[in-house]
Amino acid sequence: MYPFKQPSELIQALCDGSNNDSNSGILNIGNVSGVTNNNMEDESIIKVTMKQYQPSSGYKVNALKSLKNLVIGNPKKKQLVAEMGVLPILVNILQNSKDEELLIQSAATIGSLAHCNELIFLIIQTEPTLNFLTRHLIHFNNTNKLTETVARSVYNIFSKDITSIISSNNLGFQNADFEITKNMPLLIELLSCPNHTVNEMAAAVIRFCFSSEQRAQHYSAFSEKILPQLFRLLYTNYSSHEIILDSICKILLFSKSKEVADFICNENSNLELLTGFCFHDKLEIKLSAIDCVALLQKLNSAAGKISHRDISTNIVPEFSKILNDIYDTSVLSVQSVKKVLLSMCLCMECDLEIQSDFVSAKFISKLINISQKMLADAGGDCKFGNITASLELILAIAMMCSSNEEARSQIIESSFFIKSILISCLDLEKNPQLSTSLVEAALSCTKVLSRAQKPLRSSLISSAGNLLSILCNYIVDSSNEINIRKLAIQTFHNLTLDLESVKDFVQNNQKLLETISDVCQQASISSPTIRMSMVTLARNILYRAELSLKKKFLEHFPVSKMVDLLSSNDSESNIEFKIGVLSCIRNLIFGETNAVEHEIMSSEVCQQLVLTLLDHLKSSSVLDPAFVSEIYFVFANIVATCRNEMKRYVLQKDILDMAFKVKQEHVTNEEVVKSTLFFLSNLVWERNDQAFQKECYQQLRAYVQGDKLVNDTTNESYAVQTLVQQVNSQYKQLEDRCK
């Protein structure tokens, strides 16, 4: 045999030689070069130059066997020969050679290279590789060695997470549209043939075909032909149960088809088989089966043959055992943790009760302990966001906390989790390499925690250190992705509602106040989603704020500008946004009896505000109830806090008539009823000075019959002396309207 010593010699042997094989085609690549690292056996720049003649098939077979043996178990050498350009040479053999042994060795070499994760994208990028490889399967022979070798090589490629490889290397969907995925009837035939290697390969390719919603929709018509074959293979005793179960899982996950789920559940033996695999000794098989069961429950298939109780009593305890076993290992397997967390999330998506089951079973403390070990195993000084499974851990905890105050309490009380995990996954200044998906997950988790009760939210701010600054950076930076910016705004407005420390931070942050003003006033510079979130943030900042903060806010966003926004008829200023602006005005006026005219708004602005709102009330026979109620809350606050001249703007017959009218039209809407009663009660409030009180009674005289206010249209009456009592008894609820 030729004494090959270096990869370059082996590749050269495939390209030249003393014997000419007239049956072999000429490889039309003039020059193939590659650069190696200095530590790779001192090989530097290698150039492989094609000759005008080819070696014999036997010579090439020996070279390929030596090459395959040389790189087995050595990822660096696999990377090296790939960079030297071996793939085009192998493709040329698959395309042109008629020598079966040479074809076998070429296919086997590609399969060996495919064991190296780093080379999968290169194999996919070299577009003809898979296509010429799989053409040898079209006329397959169950007992043929070439068929089996090609199948094993294709399996080695598709057994990897090709979807992630395609995404991370920006290859696009079109680069993943291989010949073999276009021929689903062939795959179904390969799935049913009596050769386990070929079966495994077909199942792996089918799993890829259903690995995204787009692909699943394309292939969904074949589901009912594929599933019986997959379940047939599950009954056999060989090692590919994980691939088979994962294929079933992908079909359920991305097709989202209740019909497919019912097709599985209508055969009780299928359901029993899947349930049995949930307790398999091998973790990967166990988790794939659990995922299938969770998806069947989520799709509510076959009249609920899998219930919440089934998952609660069987699957949740199994997860507890899994996490205990993982934690007890000397070195934590983060890949195993990642798979377990993904399966947990899938189970929790079924319903809120299952989320509560995980919380009740003390999974929060288990996950915190595992995260501590993950950090310790990584060396302790590694930022958590760089560790595999960090994203999945954050997602799992966010789901458990989403509707469970006990879970939020457990997380917030863990200073380790808040400082070392959550903040580590948010702080781009300390770790600029954080992925967008991880930042988004961490913000979602923080938003969930920000919905906790006030004492817990206060603890969160104290424990998190620079959380407010981090959130503020995401808010003011318009280059951030919309969802990341929206999550930061929503988290901040949850925190700022009733925490003085947050309001103090806002008062001293001019850039934040400028950003709020700019986004709210200029619809063209931001998305409607961000604009709506920003006006909600402004509303919560102003809720029960001190006058000093209100004045600071008004320096950037005066009430006159808010009135302009209320007057606007452009499509960007939708009714929901205008309700938010009204809430800001309402909160600005609230409680400032002696300061409204000089510090909040002038008499002229107040008059323009009232006229604008009256126009809205008159302009449409059908108004949004939330908008109507907010208008009357603003009128009520004007009556309660402004001086008499400004109060008189709302003491108009049109406004009084409308108060009775809208209350009757929205008699079943609690907010409208409360707001109109609040407005009327403030008009007869005993704390009004006598001059204004007299004017109010004169205006209301038209509605008085005996000691009651009466709506002439509906004959509905209100006892004047009980109006204040009616509203005061519900005052707490009225305050909660801001939240």
Image (cartoon, helix red, strand yellow):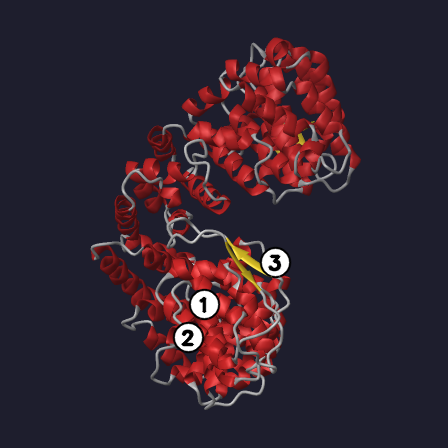
Asked whether residue 558 appears in the rendered view, the answer is yes
Q: Residue 605 placed where, x, y %?
A: 71, 16
Q: Which mark is residue 10?
A: 1
Residue position for label 2: 65
Find the distance from the CA under tag 2 to the CA under tag 3.
34 Å
Which numbered circle lies on residue 172? Answer: 3
Crowd rating for badge 3 (residues with CA inside 10 Å; few <14, some 14–19, many 20+): few
Sequence-wise, the earlier of marks 3 and 1 is: 1
Q: Answer yes or no: is residue 203 visible.
A: no
Cα distance in 3D space between marks 2 and 1: 10 Å
Horizontal side of 454 relative to 494 (left or right) equals left
Foreground residue among 709 and 381: 381
- Using a 10 Å C-alpha cutoff, classify the residue at mark 2 as few (fewer than 14 neighbours), some (14 to 19) or many (20 or more): some
277 sits to left or right of 56: left
Give x and y (percent) for residue 412.
33, 38
Q: Quadrant of residue 305?
A: bottom left
Q: Amino acid at mark 1?
A: Leu
Which is more foreground, mark 3 or mark 1? 1
- Name the residue rendered at 59%, 40% in the picture: 482
* Disc on the earlier residue, 2 or 1: 1
The amino acid marked with disc number 2 is: Lys
Query: Which label sits in the foreground, 2 or 1?
Result: 1
